[in-house]
Amino acid sequence: MINIRDYVWPAPDDGMLLWVRRFLDQAEARSWLSKATLCSALKNRLEIRDWFARKHLRGRGIELGAQQVPTNVGQGCRVEYVDVVSNETLVALYGLPVDELVPLAHVIDGNDLSVYADGALDFVIANHVLEHFDDPVGGLREWMRIVKDGGYLFITLPNFRGNCYDFERPPVRRDHLDLDHRDAEGRPARNFQHYVDICRTLYQITDPVELDRQAQEWVDADLRQHYHVYDVQSVRDVVSLAAEASSSGLRYVDGLLSPDGFEFLIVLEKRSSGGLLGWPSSMQRLIGSLRCHAMFCDLHLVRAYLLQMVSKRRS
């Protein structure tokens, strides 16, 4: 028996949030393989990130928003840490453990890294950052700017289907991402609508007045919720748009793009020419996902699978 709840809400049921319960209900209805993939992705996500980082990253780079869980890039790498708010603010607002937070080289917005010159770095790491950008195409272009040709962007994004905050929202599409990049003046109105969508799906608010009130409260607080949510196609769309809009290009090098996982991971190489190259086919994505989760296989999941097979044979 696979118990997704152990990974999503390891706390007493009486305190469980309503949207967590709805997420667990739909997750439990999935196939055995889908549930096993999600459990493995949740339990091993940090180890998976570290494995890909140690495999590909070298030299000098930065990590955005690492907080108390920096990526382990291995020996021979030099990493500076950047966040949009200070560590003191993180402790005050979110109660994060002060002794575990990474030291910050700069307190700056991740979509304006003007403290770094063009091509100054070998890599940029951004785990669960891009979904907080209302212009993710522009954010990617800025990260591309500060990475040298042949350098890497190491990015993870939450899979809308694999987390309890986003699973009831529709994934963003290419035309919307393109509009958010080109039409800065209209972006605040679209951001407001994103917040309305969060209120409607997460809190199940139906009253229009209350929807607008809560959305405006988040806008005024500049909380930068998940403006957009992502599936595999959305990840390709945002990367492709950034590559096409830049004087440089991007090549997909490696990653984990399982539709059943908790997050998408992509390693992109900056190239001197425009466009996106090397995006994997659906079969390549499936093989890569199975291979990766096999590397971090949990014995109790294998045991659950074998017990299920025995039970089916007996019935």
Image: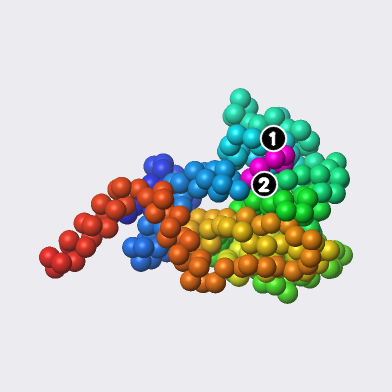
- Which percent across, then down, holds residue 307? 21, 56
Q: Give the range drawn in magenta.
A: 57-62
Marks 2 and 1, how far apart in space?
Answer: 12 Å
| Image point (82%, 49%), residue name | 119
The image shows residue 97, relative to residue 155, as above or below, that is above
**Is 12 in front, or is 178?**
178
Q: Return the residue found at the far left.
A: 314
What amino acid type is highlighted by mark number 1? Arg
| Left or right position of 34 against 182 | left
- Which percent across, then down, holds residue 115? 85, 41
Identify the residue under disc 2.
Answer: 125
- Which percent across, then down, holds residue 214? 68, 55
| Image point (54%, 55%), residue name | 263
The image shows residue 96, relative to residue 218, as above or below, that is above
Q: Do the residues labelled 2 and 1 touch (CB within 8 Å)?
A: no
| Image point (46%, 46%), residue name | 44
Residue 78 disc label: 1
